[in-house]
Image (spheres, rainbow, N blue to C red):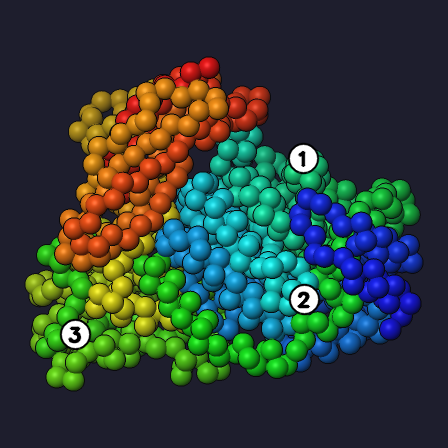
Amino acid sequence: MSRIISFAWLLLCAAPATAQTGLNKKTERAVDSVLRLMTLDEKIGQMNQYNGPWSATGPLTNDGNLLDQVKSGKVGSMLNVTGVKRTRELQELALQSRLKIPLLFGQDVIHGYRTIFPLPLAEAASWDLAAMEASARVAAKEASAAGIHWTFAPMLDISRDPRWGRVMEGAGEDTYLGSLIATARVKGFQGKGFGDTSAVMACAKHFVAYGAAEGGRDYNTVDMSMRRLHEVYLPPFKAAADAGVATFMNSFNDLNGIPATGSKYLQRDLLKGAWKFNGFMVSDWGSIGEMINHGYAKDNREAAMLAANAGSDMDMESRSYTKELATLVKEGKVKMSVIDDAVRRILRKKMEMGLFANPYKYADLKREQDNWDNPEHRKIARDIAQKSMVLLKNEGSVLPLSTKTSSIALIGPFVKAKSDHLGFWSYDWPDDTARISSIWEAVSRKMGGDSKLLYAKGAAITGDDRSGFAEAIEKAGKAEIVILTVGEARDMSGEAKSRSSLQLPGVQEELVKAIVALGKPTVVLISAGRPLIFNWTADHAPAILYTWWLGTEGGNAIADVLFGDYNPSGRLPMSFPRAEGQIPIYYNHYNTGRPAMHDSDKFYRSAYTDLSIYPKYPFGYGLSYTQFEYSPVSLSAATLRKGQTLRASVTLTNKGKVAGKETVQLYIRDLSGSVVRPVKELKGFQQLTLAAGESRKISFDITVEDLRFYNEQLQYIWEPGAFKLYIGKDAAHNNEAAFEVLQ
Ligand code: BGC
C-alpha cells in the first residue's frame, strides 16, 4: 500500500460518511493530500470515464489500449463493467498506476440488477414511495454486491410527451409526484450512506429539461422560459440534491441555445453555487464532443474548454478531456483551479465510498453469490409489480376471475413471453427462462385442476401477418373467459425509441376487434413502456389492465391481479392521449383567454375541431375491484394567512364488497396571480386501504408554503387571493372547495 493511500486510510477510519451539505474536514484533508501529489495528467485521468470492453450503451470511441490507460492512471472511472471478477481485475490494473487511485465503477442500474423491477414509470404508477425506495434498495444491494459503486439513476426528467421513448425511465408528467419519487429513489440507492457496502452512489439525470425535447424526438432541442424550467423541470433535481445524491449527469439537449453540457448557468451557478452541491457532474455519453454537432464548439478542444469551465467534471466516453485539457491548461484557457475543483469532487466520492481505504471493498464473491437469488428480493419485486398495474376498465366486473372458471383462452404475443417482461434498460441473465414465469405459467398455477387453459398467439407484436387470427378466434370461441395480451415490444420504448405513432403496433388492434366481436368476457392486458393509444379497445373491450413492463415477477404479479389476490391500486402518472395530435397533453396546463371547458363549446375555443378536449384517461386515473365514494370537502376555515394551517377533509367510503386501496389526491388552483397559474396542481396525496363498507376521514394540512411559485423575476413567492381546492380520485374527478389567502 502506498504512503498516500495509507495516509488517506488513517484519516478516513474516523470519518463518517458525509451528507450533501456538510463537508467532512477529515475527508477534505485526505482529498487535498492526494491532490497535492498529482500531476496534471493524473488529474485529467480522474476526469475521464471509459466504457468497459464487454458491452456498450452508446457509440464507442476506440483509442489505444484501454487496459494500458487504466494502468497508467489515465482513467478515473469505468462504466459497463460488472461482476466481482471483472471489477476486481480492472481495479488491480488501476492499482498499478503511480498513485494507486482506485477506479469507480458506474452502471445503468435503472430498475434492478439481478432482480428486475417494474419500469420506473410503472413504479411511479404505484404512487407508493416506500415501495419505490425498497425497490431501489434491493437494486443497490444486488449491484453493489456485483462490484458496482454507482448507478446512473434515478432519471428525473419530467415529460409531457409519450412519443419520447424515455418516458419509461422517469416518473411521468408531474413535478410534485416526481420530486417525492426522486427523494425516495435516492434514499433507496444510497441506503445508510456512502461507504456502507450495500449502498451505491445515485446519479440525478439528465440535467436538465431533456424530457421536454421538441416533438418528443430524443436528444432534441429544448426552448423554454426560465419560469417553466424552475417551476416544472428543476424541482425533482433539487429534491435529489437535498436528499444527498452523490452525482448528477448532464443532458444531451441544448436548453435555450446552450447545450446543457456546456451550460455554466446550470452546472456552476445553479447546481454547485445556489444549491451547494458537493458531488460531481458526469457528462452524458459523448455529450462533450457532441457540442461540435450542436454547433456550439468548433472542435474537441473548444468542447473540452466549454464543458470543463461550465462544470462538467467527468467526461463519459468523448475523450475530449484526455486529448485536450492539458493543452487548454497550458494555454490558460482552463484554470488549474477548475481542474482541481473537478478532481476534488471525484476523489471526495471515492473517499466517502471507502475505496481509498479498501479498493476491493465491493468485490466480495460471497456477497455476490448471496445476492444472486434472493427470495426476499423477488418478494419485494412482486409486491411493487402488483402495485404498478393500472385497471383502466372493468365493465360488468369481468375481473377478478375465479380460479374455478371452466376454461380460459390466453391469446396474444405476450402470453408465453419471459424476458419481454423486463423492459428496456434491464439485464438478461442466462437462467431467465427458468427464473421468470410467463403469464401462461403463472395463470396455470392459479387455476383449479378441472379448468382448461387454451392458447393461441394470434399475431406477432409487429408486422401484418393475420394468419394466426383463425386459431385465436377458434380458441377464444371455446373458452368461458378470454385474456388477450397486446402491446409494445420490450425495446420499443427507451433511449432513442421515440415513436410518431402510439397505436398498438402491427395488427394487434385488429386481433382485439376479432376477439372482442365474439362477445365473451374479455380482459385485455396492455404491456408498454409509455402511454399508448388504443381507442377502439378502450371503447369496446370489457376489461383493460395496463401492465407496463413489470420485471422478473411480472407474470406472477399479473396473475395475482387477474384472480383478485391483489386488488389493483395503480394510478396513471401521465395523462393518456386519445390521438398523437393531442400531445402535449397534461393536467396542469394554463387556461387560455378562450379556454375549452366542454366538448360542446363550439366557438373560438382552445381545442381541436376534430378531437375531444379530454385525454382518454386523465392523470391520476385508475380503478379498483371496489368503488370508493367521496364526501364533499370540508375546510377548517375559509381563509388562510402566513403561519396558519388550513385543514381540508373528506370522508372516504368503500362502497364495494372487497377491501381496496385508494389514492386520495389533493389539487389546488390559484385563481389569479401576478403570472398565469395552472388550472390545477397536485399538492398532496394519501394512500389508504379500507375494508368493504368502511369509512374514514382524510385530512390535508395546507399552509402558504404549499402555494409558492416562481414569479416573473424568478422569486419563489406566494400571493394573497382566491384559491380552489379539489380532493378526489384523479385530476378530473374530484370535489371542490374555495378559500382565500390573506396577506
Ligand atoms: C444515456 C444515459 C446513460 C448513459 C450510459 C446515455 O446514452 O443517456 O442515461 O446513463 O448512456 O449508459
Identify residue type, mark 1.
Ala
Residue at disc 3, secondary structure: loop
- Distance between the alpha carbons at the discs numbered 2 and 3: 48 Å
Q: What is the number of callouts on the image?
A: 3
Residue marked by disc 3:
403
Dividing the image into 4 quarters, which one contains the N terminus? bottom right
The percent position of residue 590, horizontal first and vertical second, equals 38, 28
Residue marked by disc 2:
105
User: Label 3 near label 1: C-beta < 8 Å?
Assistant: no
Q: Which of marks 1 and 3 is nearer the N terminus?
A: 1
In the rendered image of this protein, does residue 734 appear above or below residue 87?
above
Q: Earlier in the sequence, mark 2 or mark 3?
A: 2
Residue at disc 2, secondary structure: strand
Q: Which of 619 and 220 is in front in this view?
A: 619
Residue 147: image quadrant is: bottom right
Identify residue type, mark 2.
Phe
Q: Residue at x 59, y 38 (%)?
A: 255
Q: Residue at x 32, y 54 (%)?
A: 570
Residue 285: image quadrant is: bottom right
Residue marked by disc 1:
274
Between marks 2 and 1 in the image, the one whose residue lies nearer the viewer: 1
Q: Mark 2 near ligand 1 (CB under 8 Å)?
A: no
In the rendered image of this protein, does residue 515 appear above or below residue 164?
below
